[in-house]
Image (cartoon, rainbow, N blue to C red):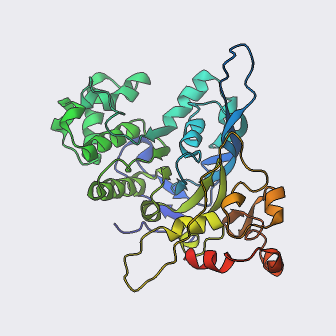
Amino acid sequence: MSDPAISATGTKKVTCREKGRFESDTVDYTASPLLDVRELKKHFPVRTKDLFRPARDFVRAVDGVSFFINPGETLALVGESGSGKSTTARLILRLLEPTAGEILFEGRSLGRLGPEMMRQARKQMQMIFQDPYASLNPRLTVEEIIAEPLQIFHVGSPVERSRKVSRLLDIVGLASRHAKRYPHEFSGGQRQRIGIARALALNPKLIIGDEPVSALDVSIQAQVLNLLKDLQEEFGLTYLFIAHDLSVVEFVSDRVAVMYLGIIVEMADKETLFRHPLHPYTQALLSAVPVPDPDCRRERIILPGDIPSPVNPPAGCRFHPRCQVCREVCRREAPVFREVKPGHYVACHIRGQGSEARGRKEEVGDGGQETVDGGGT
């Protein structure tokens, strides 16, 4: 698939075939962010045996996450299981109410919207789920599944909805004759295409993919990823793509944010992050990605221990118990998530201060800095 044309002003031109919002979309990367997440937190209370005593402990699933997504781009959110990626997605859609923080969509704070206003806002934000088997109602036909969002929002007559379903099936590469079939009659890849068609039904601006290809075979993954990229180019879609497979992330994303234990530790465009990672955790993740070149050797960075409990996260930097370049300040103070280069953000006392940190190299403990630097490229 060829890249869309980029004008001299930095505006991506998008060709569209669907009527309505998709008729003549132009995605302007110089515009304000479509989605702006600021210091988002979600703390779940830990249940106690005493029903009448309030919870004293909380699971800090998301604990101060900030990022933005520009119109027409893909931000990938990566990290180990339990890092808070899926919880972040549900907070954005307000399927969960945040403990603190703010979510701005097209400049409007979603937390300040009433039920009806939020209901209308959800038309512009749709989700593709991880499991193509559990996310489709087995008692409904494909036509009923895809048309359900249209019925909920009273879009069109039954005949118009049926025509819309046929167009959507064609867009995702399925024949219109499949509309009367049930989900069990399709393969996993075909079911995920049905889920994508359902997400497109209301002409959304933002689509959140919660590991949409992780349950599929590798050969089918490529087909679905190519479909998502084609749809983005054609309709000017904006994606928040949640994944843990870094090879998939490198293919599909424009920028990447790395989560660890409820916080984002690094964020940059994919070329910068994959070739010049700064945070030790990012470097360790990238060192585990296989390189399809027998002449290219990569030293694997093995992180000691397990991820700490989100109920009682470590003081200071949350990564310091497993970090190979940890020093005393890392144990005392949480690092600031700061921009160290244009568009490159990192939360690290050592890698997040440029020449100042490198000048205090003698404070770093023995063994590890050179190994980590070499492992992330």
Left or right: 98, with 254 as reference point: right
Identified at 61% across, 53% down, the residue is: 259
The quarter in which the N terminus is drawn is: bottom left
Residue 366 image position (x, y, % from top left): 73, 77
| Depth check, front residue: 285 or 362 | 362
Quadrant of the rendered structure where residue 95 is? top right
Q: Is residue 102 above or below residue 113?
A: below
Left or right: 357, with 96 as reference point: right
| Depth check, front residue: 289 or 163 | 289
The quarter in which the C terminus is drawn is: bottom right
Identified at 67% across, 22% down, the residue is: 48
Residue most extreme to the top = 52
Identified at 82% across, 80% down, the residue is: 362
Left or right: 275, with 159 as reference point: right
Q: Does residue 296 appear in the picture of this structure? A: yes
Q: How many marks?
A: 0
Residue 51 image position (x, y, % from top left): 68, 14
| Depth check, front residue: 334 or 30 | 334
Residue 54 image position (x, y, % from top left): 74, 20
Q: Is residue 337 above or below residue 40?
A: below
Left or right: 370, with 183 as reference point: right
Q: Is residue 121 above or below residue 344?
A: above
Residue most extreme to the left = 177
